[in-house]
Image (spheres, helix red, strand yellow):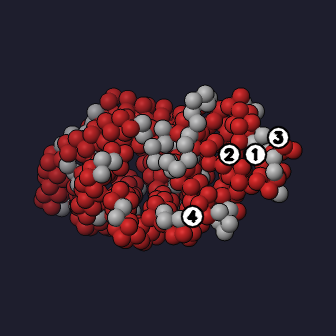
C-alpha cells in the first residue's frame, strides 16, 4: 500500500478520539506536502499507540521518547483502536527499518506491553527481532534485546531467551545502563526459574532487585520481587513467597503496572490454593481475572481459568473443571502459550481420572508430556509424571505407576521442589503398599507427611 493511502486509512476506528488524533497528526492530505506524509504517518503511529498503550496498561515501560496524549482520550476507544490497528502499526514499523530505524525501535518499545499481554507473539517476535538488528545504530540495542528475550521466554524458547538476555546484559553493562542490565538479569532469572534452577533464579533475581533499587526503578523492583516470590514458592518457602509477592503487589499498584498486578494477584491466589485457603485463593483469582479481562491479557485469562478449574476439581465440581480446562487449552493453543497449554492438559487428565474416564486421562496427560519436552519445564514434567502415576494406579498398573512416580521424584530432587517430592513419595507409598511392602510403604508415607508438614501443606490440599 502506498504511504499516502495508508496514511488516509490509518485507523478503522471512528471514535471522537481517533478522529481528533487524525486531525492533529494527519490533516487533509491535499494541504500537506505529500513527501512528508510517511513521517507524519509514523509520528501519528508513535503518539497514538503510546496514548492507547498507556491508557490500557498504565504502560510504565513504554518508550518515553514519544509522549502520550491522554488528556481527552477514551480508554474504550483506544483499546478498540489498538486491536484493529496493531497489525498495521507493526507493518509500518517493519517497513521503516532501513530508512528510519529509530521509528522501528520506538514502536518495538511502545507496543511491547500490548503484544505480550494480548498474545500476539508472532508479531512481537518479528518486531523485536527487527528492532534488535538495527538498534545498534540508535544506541538502544540493550532494550531491544531485552524485549526479544521476553518474547523467546513467553513462547517457550528458554535457551534463546537466555542468549538474548545475555547479549542485552553485556551491551547494557558496557553502556553503563544499570536499569537495562537489571532487566536482562531479571529475564535470565525467569528463564532459570522455568528450567528448574530455582536457587540460581533467587540469586539472579536478587541481583536484579539490587540494581533496580540502585537506580530507583520501582517498576523493575516489582517484577524482581514477583520472580523471587515464585522461586521461593517452588522451593517450598511459602511465607517468604507470600512476603515477596505482597511487596511486589504494592509496587505494581504504586506504579500503575496493571499487567503485573494481575499476575501477582494470581500468584498469591495459587499460594493460598497450595496452602488449602480456597476461599481466599478464589478471591485472588477473581481479582486477577478482572484485570486480565480488562487489559485483554489472554494468557492471564487462561491461567486464571486453569487455577479456578483446579479449585473446582478439588471440590468435586469436575464437569465445571473440564469446561474450564478445555477453554484454557483452546485459548493457549490459539495464542501459542505452551506452558499454559501443558498445565491445562494436565488438568484435563486429572479431571478425566476423577470421573473414571481413564482413556481420556491417559490421552491428555501424554499430550502434556509430549508438549513439555520442547519446554523442558521440570515443574510441569514432575507434575505430569505424578498425575500419570496416579492414573496408572487407578488402572491397577502398579509397576508402571512406580516408574512414573520414581521419575517425578528424581526431577523434584534435582530442582529442589519439596512439594513435587512429597507428591512422588506419597505415590510411591501407595504403590509399595499395593505390592505388599508395608514397611517400605509406611516409611515413604512418613517421609511424604514430613515434607508436607515442613512446607505447611495440610492434608486437604495434598492434591
How far across and how far down the image is residue 39, in percent? Answer: 71, 54
Q: Are marks 2 and 1 in contact (CB under 8 Å)?
A: yes
Residue at figure coordinates x 66%, y 49% from the top left:
43
Nearer the observer: mark 2 or 1; the answer is 2
Helix or strand or loop: what does disc 2 sit on? helix
Q: Which image quarter holds the N terminus?
A: bottom right
The CA span between labels 2 and 3 is: 14 Å
Of the numbered discs 2 and 3, the one sitting upstream in the chain is 3
Q: Kindly state the secondary structure of the residue where label 3 is placed.
A: loop
Image point (49%, 65%), residue name: 139
In the rendered structure, which disc, 3 or 4, sits on the residue that comes first in sequence?
A: 3
Viewer can see residue 441: yes
Residue under numbered circle 1: 10
Q: Is 235 on the left or on the right of 384, as rendered?
A: left
Q: Position of residue 424 (x, y in %)?
A: 27, 58
Where disc 4 sits, the SS reads helix
Tell me whether circle 2 and circle 4 mark residues in contact (CB < 8 Å).
no
Q: Which residue is mark 4?
A: 131
Amino acid at each position: 500500500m502506498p504511504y499516502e493511502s495508508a496514511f488516509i486509512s490509518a485507523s478503522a476506528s471512528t471514535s471522537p478520539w481517533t478522529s481528533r488524533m487524525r486531525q492533529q497528526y494527519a490533516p487533509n492530505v491535499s494541504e500537506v506536502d505529500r513527501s512528508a506524509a510517511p513521517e507524519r504517518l509514523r509520528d501519528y503511529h508513535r503518539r497514538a499507540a503510546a496514548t492507547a498503550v498507556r491508557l490500557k496498561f498504565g504502560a510504565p515501560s513504554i518508550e518515553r521518547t514519544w509522549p502520550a496524549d491522554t488528556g481527552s482520550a477514551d480508554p474504550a476507544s483506544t483499546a478498540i483502536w489498538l486491536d484493529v490497528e496493531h497489525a498495521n502499526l507493526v507493518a509500518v514499523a517493519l517497513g521503516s527499518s532501513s530508512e528510519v530505524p529509530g521509528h522501528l525501535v520506538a514502536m518495538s518499545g511502545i507496543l511491547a506491553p500490548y503484544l505480550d499481554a494480548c498474545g500476539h507473539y508472532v508479531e512481537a517476535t518479528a518486531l523485536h527481532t527487527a528492532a534488535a538488528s538495527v538498534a545498534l545504530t540508535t544506541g538502544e540495542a540493550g532494550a531491544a534485546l531485552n524485549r526479544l528475550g521476553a518474547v523467546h521466554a513467553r513462547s517457550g524458547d528458554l535457551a534463546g531467551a537466555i542468549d538474548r538476555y545475555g547479549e542485552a546484559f553485556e551491551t547494557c553493562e558496557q553502556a553503563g545502563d544499570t536499569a537495562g542490565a537489571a532487566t536482562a538479569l531479571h529475564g535470565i532469572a525467569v528463564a532459570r526459574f522455568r528450567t528448574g534452577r530455582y536457587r540460581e533464579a533467587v540469586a539472579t533475581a536478587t541481583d536484579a532487585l539490587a540494581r533496580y533499587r540502585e537506580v530507583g526503578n520501582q517498576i523493575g523492583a516489582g517484577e524482581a520481587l514477583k520472580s523471587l516470590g515464585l522461586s521461593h514458592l517452588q522451593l517450598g518457602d511459602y511465607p517468604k513467597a507470600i512476603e515477596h509477592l505482597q511487596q511486589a503487589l504494592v509496587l505494581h499498584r504504586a506504579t500503575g503496572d496493571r499487567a503485573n498486578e494481575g499476575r501477582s494477584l494470581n500468584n498469591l491466589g495459587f499460594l493460598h490454593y497450595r496452602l488449602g485457603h480456597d476461599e481466599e485463593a478464589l478471591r485472588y483469582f477473581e481479582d486477577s481475572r478482572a484485570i486480565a479481562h480488562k487489559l485483554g491479557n489472554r494468557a492471564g485469562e487462561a491461567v486464571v481459568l486453569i487455577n479456578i478449574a483446579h479449585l473446582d476439581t478439588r471440590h468435586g465440581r469436575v464437569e465445571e473443571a473440564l469446561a474450564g480446562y478445555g477453554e484454557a487449552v483452546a485459548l493457549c493453543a490459539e495464542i501459542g502459550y505452551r506452558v499454559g497449554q501443558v498445565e491445562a492438559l494436565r488438568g484435563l487428565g486429572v479431571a478425566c481420572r476423577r470421573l473414571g474416564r481413564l482413556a481420556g486421562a491417559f490421552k491428555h496427560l501424554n499430550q502434556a508430556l509430549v508438549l513439555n519436552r520442547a519446554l523442558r519445564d521440570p515443574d510441569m514434567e514432575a507434575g505430569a509424571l505424578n498425575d500419570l502415576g496416579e492414573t496408572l494406579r487407578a488402572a491397577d498398573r502398579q509397576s508402571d505407576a512406580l516408574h512414573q512416580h520414581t521419575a517425578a521424584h528424581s526431577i523434584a530432587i534435582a530442582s529442589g521442589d519439596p512439594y513435587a517430592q512429597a507428591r512422588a513419595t506419597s505415590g510411591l507409598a501407595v504403590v509399595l503398599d499395593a505390592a505388599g511392602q508395608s514397611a517400605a510403604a509406611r516409611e515413604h508415607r512418613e517421609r511424604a507427611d514430613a515434607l508436607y508438614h515442613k512446607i505447611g501443606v495440610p492434608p486437604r490440599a495434598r492434591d
